[in-house]
Image: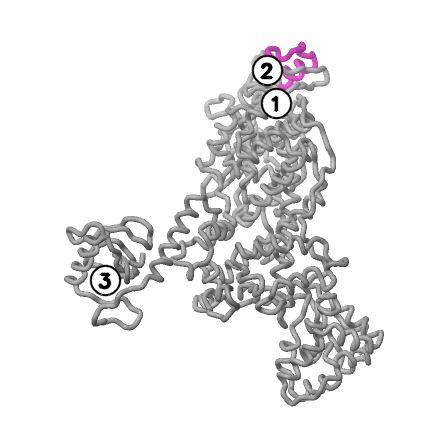
Amino acid sequence: MGTGRLTGRRDQEATVPEQSTAAGRAAGSSAESTGTGSPRSLAEALRSRDDAGLRALLRARPDLLSPVPGDVTQLATRAGTRASVVRALERLDRFALQTAEALAVAPDPCPYPVLESLLTGETGESGHDNGARAALPRALDTLREQALVWGEDDRLRLVRTARELLAPSAQRPSPTGLGPTVAEATAGMSPTRVQEIVAAAGLPATHDPVSAVAALTGLFTDPRRMSALLDEAPAEAHQVLGRLVWGPPYGEVTPNPTAPVRWLRDRGLLLPASARTVVLPREVALHLRGGLAHRDTAPVAPAVPAHREHRPPLVDANAAGQALAALATVEELVKSWEYAGPPVLRAGGLSVRDLKRAAALLDTGESQAAFWIELAYAAGLLAGDGEADERYAPTPAFDDWRELPPAERWSALAAAWLPATRTAGLAGEQDAKGRTLSVLGPELDRSAAPEVRRRVLELLAELPEGASPDPDALLDRLAWERPVRGTSDLRARLAHGVLTEAEVLGVTGRGALSGPGRALLERRDPAPLLAPLLPEPVDHVLLQADLTAVAPGPLRRPLGDTLAVLADVESKGGATVYRFTPGSVRRALDAGHTAVDLHAFLKEHSRTPVPQPLAYLIDDVARRHGHLRVGAASSYVRCDDDSVLGEILADKRSAGMGLRRLAPTVLAAQAEPGALLDGLRAMGYAPAAESRTGDVVVARADARRAPARSAPVPVPDGPPVPDATLLGAAVRAVRAGERAATAVRKEPAEPTGAPGELPRTSAAETLATVQAAALTGSAVWIGYVNADGAASQRVIAPVRVEGGFVTGYDHTADEVRTYALHRITGVAELADDHL
């Protein structure tokens, strides 16, 4: 084939079968001969740790605590299971992960100098080393602390499960881009073919396939001989090798490859992986790379420099303005769902149409509207009402929230945002099954969101006060701290969303962390810091001749509620502009206000005289309001002026209402009363609804409230980090279990059980033994069956024996316990008071 046809194969992550308990125990406790002073297994390495070392392991890998291991062997076994190792690898920084990847392709066990050369290259002193040499001890300490690596520096061992996950195979190339070793690649090759390769490479002939493979491996790992062999290669062959050297190491070949490919294949520099695929052996790739396992190592975390600097008061003022706007937005959104909230989809969540309506109401984009909806939901202000035709509605908590001072209302929103696992930025995308992710739907929870959100704020807090970072630099830092394994970029997308959400919420101002935002991050109440930055609510507006009113600040509650009914919001900001229209005035009249009430309200709350155009507008709409009355006949229209009814009948727009005259002042209609009201208003009339007794109906719906509920519980991202008390108790339990498991027992004179089992003793023997132990203060080994039928072995020091029970200090549980004598299956003394 031509060299242009050689292509790399995509990396594919193979599925590694779940390790069985027996296999995990073998990984944790296999007794492999090692050098003097080096632990023989992971369990032995953990057993040699002090309590601080065990606490560090359990703090870094809290999943090992569920449940608390019975002894060190159980701890080592659990630390080697696939799920736990995967979780630990996902939480390594980039260089620690690169170190683990280098160990996965290194000899097992691996001396420290070999590992160092894989990360710094054969000429690390002269240019390849970019700080990796100095950073390697830290990375290795991290891997040792998390029980992913064990052994002394002369015999470093990567936990078997981690090696299986990171080492290359035919189905899953290594993250380093290296392929299998010569021995692995030739495992299924015929001895004749191996002999041919050895001969073509200029090596002595041998009839032993193992010796032939070893000779070929020795050639590829000898820099001098490899350089001489490559000097003989055609120029095109070097181009072929260059395409595979950094991975993927596989390439496709045609049945009739070109001369350069044949030259490489004949000498084993390319080995067949299948009928149409060749692979570059690991030893060859390492020689071509200069001994480097990675093309680029990242031993040092990327810096997050200050991109722009602002005066801290300016940052806080900007954040306070955003906070005030956030409060108004959330309140406007939730209030709009008081009377006729959007329906809940059958699968849960909000429809796209209702999301668009919310965005139009808030005068923002759909993604921004999704954030405000999810924030209100996370704060417990919204919920489904639980009815058969379920709709979203405010909760009683919304009423309590509205009564709080502005700073405390913002604090409640921010406190709900920081730990929330809801990710509004994913709304509208599709999941693995092709289903669209909807706002408020159950599919938007991402357990990584709180950790990413907090980490972004922590990086902002590390900058000088008032400084904002370059977003790209911040994302690079996050990517170094948690490298992406696979194709998922969820953390990067979450970080993008955090920067946007923090700005619109007021946690940051102009990209810099604000004072209240810093208090929120430090788990302090941000309300005292925010309150002085917010303007005081005002109790007046400024009426203008163009039928608008300007609110010079946030309005107090009664004034704001009434004005929201009487006028429409035209623009928002530091000052809100309201516009009076015939429709808004009619809305106030429908809500039960009279013209006199509206005039008195405006006169009381305006610092300027009521403009004449506004007074005329109110009087004109009020004069016509209720002139027509609609009731249920199905429905009817009644008017004292029969000429007005004649105009309605003559209007072509009334044809669809099914009107006919019943009397000079009454028209009957086939349309429902609500539709008839809307139709007449569309024609320019101002009808009022009429009750059965002829009274005007106030068209104000009752505010709906969903049942009280607490804010949604965030989805945890694995087990929580244990506190010092739990860590101390867990370490004591492991130590006690280890002492009990390794204690030397005295076997009875005539053992009745199988070897290794607890001897069975009669009730009399059991009673006599524990009584003697209580008198002498010695410890005994017992077998015990609890009320659920679960059998266990305990080491106890009896203190009191009475009433059919024995009370003593349980060394296994590290506490005083009481056991029923009839549930003790057998008892044996411990040799030489071992404990």
- Point out the stretch of residues depicted in magenta: 601-621
For the residue pair 204 and 515, the one nearer the viewer reads as 204
Q: Residue 815: where, in percent of width, then height? A: 31, 49
Quick one: quadrant of the C terminus? bottom left
Q: 10 Å neighbourhood of mark 3: few (<14), some, or many (≥20)?
A: many
* In the image, farthest residue toward the right: 235
529 or 383, which lies in front? 529
Q: For mark 1, give the secondary structure.
A: loop
Q: Earlier in the sequence, mark 2 or mark 1?
A: 1
Q: As shown in the figure, which amino acid type bears the numbered disc 2?
A: Asp
- Number of the label disc, if any, that sits on residue 827: 3
Q: With 293 as the anchor, is 772 left or right in this view?
A: left
Give the mark, 1 or 3, whose residue is nearer the N terminus.
Answer: 1
Tell us which disc is closer to us: 1 or 3.
3
Does the segment drawn in magenta span residue 607? yes
Q: In the displayed structure, would residue 1 be above or below residue 350?
A: below
Q: Nearer the viewer, mark 2 or mark 3?
A: 3
Which quarter of the figure is the N terminus placed in? bottom right
Residue 534 got which mark?
Answer: 1
Question: Of residues 229 and 696, which is closer to you in this image?
Answer: 229
**Residue at the far top in the pictured view:** 609
* The image quarter in which residue 219 lies: bottom right
Which residue lies at the image location 60% right of the left edge and 28% below the top edge? 328
Q: Is residue 743 magenta?
A: no
> Which quadrant of the figure has residue 541?
top right
Residue drawn at x 67%, y 50% is: 300
Distance between mark 2 and mark 1 Cα atoms: 16 Å
Q: Position of residue 230 (x, y in %)?
A: 79, 75
Q: Is residue 52 above or below residue 255?
A: above
**In the picture provided, is 612 more to the left or to the right than 750?**
right
Q: Label 2, on which residue?
A: 539
Who comes first in sequence, dot 2 or dot 3? Answer: 2
